Image: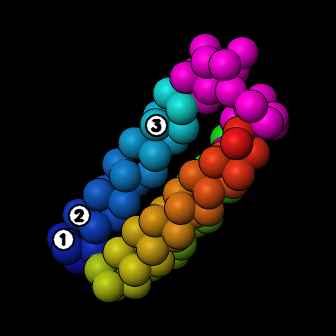
Amino acid sequence: MTDRTGTAKALVLIASGVLFAAAGVVCFLVALFAPRLRGWPYSGAVAFMVITVLTVALAIFLTLRGRTPQRVVLGGCATLLIGAAIAVGTLLVLIT
């Protein structure tokens, strides 16, 4: 493992932690404002958290298996970006 691969892995793991923390904040805000939301806010928060946890787990798996910096960044960051977009879309569909 080169220096660049280790740095790329560290950055993707930090991004995974940030996404997981953001999911916690979003779930707290949904629970706080649930009485004012239409649709299924609690189901949306649970679905958002499940998708986020699965995305983070997959990103960490792909990151740790990556041998080159390109594989680490493409596998980890792309997974986080796509998973976050799907999670937000699911949340918006369920709370509106």
The numbered mark at residue 7 is 2
Q: Is residue 57 visible?
A: no
Neighbourhood count class around disc 3 (C-alpha, 10 Å): few under 14, some 14–19, many 20 upward: some
Q: Which residues are magenta?
A: 27-48
Name the residue carrying label 1. 3
Circle 2 SS class: helix
Q: Position of residue 55 (x, y in %)?
A: 61, 59
The numbered mark at residue 75 is none
Q: Nearer the viewer, mark 3 or mark 1?
A: 3
Q: Nearer the viewer, mark 2 or mark 1?
A: 2
The question of residue 35 being in magenta is answered with yes
Q: How many marks?
A: 3
Q: Please name the amino acid that badge 3 sits on.
A: Ala
Neighbourhood count class around disc 2 (C-alpha, 10 Å): few under 14, some 14–19, many 20 upward: few
* 66 to the left or right of 58: left
Q: Residue at x 35, y 48 (%)?
A: 14
Q: Residue at x 54, y 32 (%)?
A: 26
- Front-most of 20 and 61? 20
* 37 to the left or right of 66: right
Q: Please name the amino acid that badge 1 sits on.
A: Asp
Name the residue carrying label 3. 22
Q: Earlier in the sequence, mark 3 or mark 1?
A: 1
Circle 3 SS class: helix
**16 relative to 20, above or below:** below
Q: Disc 2 versus disc 3: distance between alpha carbons?
A: 22 Å
Q: Residue at x 71, y 51 (%)?
A: 93
Q: Please name the amino acid that badge 2 sits on.
A: Thr
- Front-most of 77 and 81? 81
